[in-house]
Image: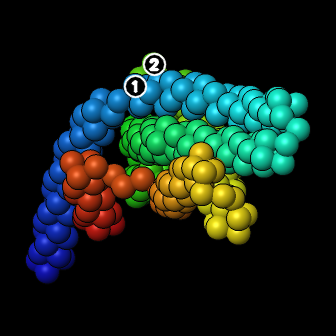
Amino acid sequence: MIPMLLLWTLTGCGWWEHHQACTAARSTEAAAWGVLTTALATDTASIDATGLLAAATELDGRAKAAGAAAVATPAQTGEAAQDAFTRASRASGTASGQAQATWTDWSLKVQGHGLDADHQAARVPIAIERIEAWGKATAAVRLRLGLARARYEAAVQTGEGRLGVPDAFQGLGALAPLPAEPPKELAELQAAVATADADHRAAQAGLKAALDDADRLAFDVDRAGQIAATDATDYAFLNFPPEAQVAQAAALAAGASGTRATESTVRLRAAVSAHRNDLEAPPAMPPGSATALAAAEAAVKGTVAACE
């Protein structure tokens, strides 16, 4: 009889110790999850995604205006060149007059090519600024979306399901469903996820449009620069007389414009390459939330081990 009582006593003590350990682990987990919730909210509040989206949208308008201005000038210059040739031809029927008309016409056309290269190259800084603005906006909105998803999962999930919060932050898989009658706070968190997701899609579309436009602009700038550079090279083979100084000046200016256009093309393509991966790059959780999440995950595992 005594051994049986002793066994019951020992068993009861073991159960009590297990219960206390489980209770302590749950308390630690609850505290860690509270710290994580606060950290996620703090990091979310620090993101100015709305301002970055507005700045990127404003740059879209400036880039389009710069593109419209660049298109108009070359055509007008070409018309002026042809008018100059026609006037010069009619003004003098001599061989000297015809020669002067030829190099004057060539000079004006080359000036037009140089202006075209300069105007196209002038669009590059705004295009790069636009790409960078959309890149920053996309990164900020994606981070806000990740934090919104993490806050939602942290509030909805229980037990070992909470170990899936990092996946939610990275946008992997669907969110956990709301309870049948969710409290107002959970519904608000779900709405915040939906809003952040819509903003993220808009930012991705803006960045993609900026990158695609930049690809086309790089082609246009490169082409205009090559035409201007070719004009500069051709001058040496046209055998214009020494008095055709306007042609020589036009050739030198075109060569400089071609060089500037080529350098601008290199910068623009480098910006496109640097930001192309921003379309799908996963966000890195801010240090405060990352530390709190690691502690919360460890607490969940501790609870599972203590309460088995």
- Nearer to us in this view, 61 or 244: 244
Q: Where's residue 275, x and y in %?
A: 50, 55
Q: Residue furthest bottom?
A: 3
- Nearer to us in this view, 75 or 100: 100
Whether residues under marks 2 and 1 lie with C-beta atoms below 8 angstroms apart, the answer is no
Residue plotted at (73% across, 63% down): 238
- State the CA–CA distance, disc 2 to disc 1: 28 Å
Q: Where's residue 122, x and y in %?
A: 52, 40
Residue ID for mark 1: 51
Tell me: 6 left or right of 187. left
- Nearer to us in this view, 162 or 130: 130
**Where the C terminus falls, by quadrant?**
bottom left
Residue ID for mark 2: 184
Task: State which tag comes first along the sequence, 2 or 1.
Answer: 1
Residue plotted at (23% across, 52% down): 287
Disc 1: CA contacts within 10 A as few (<14), some (14-19) or many (>=20):
few
> What SS does tag 1 mark?
helix
- Nearer to us in this view, 265 or 215: 265
Residue plotted at (74% across, 44% down): 100
Disc 2: CA contacts within 10 A as few (<14), some (14-19) or many (>=20):
few
Residue plotted at (18% across, 51% down): 28
Residue 191 drawn above or below residue 93: above
> What SS does tag 2 mark?
helix
Tag 1: residue type?
Answer: Gly
Let me know if residue 104 appears in the view.
yes
Q: Quadrant of residue 104?
A: top right
Tag 2: residue type?
Answer: Lys
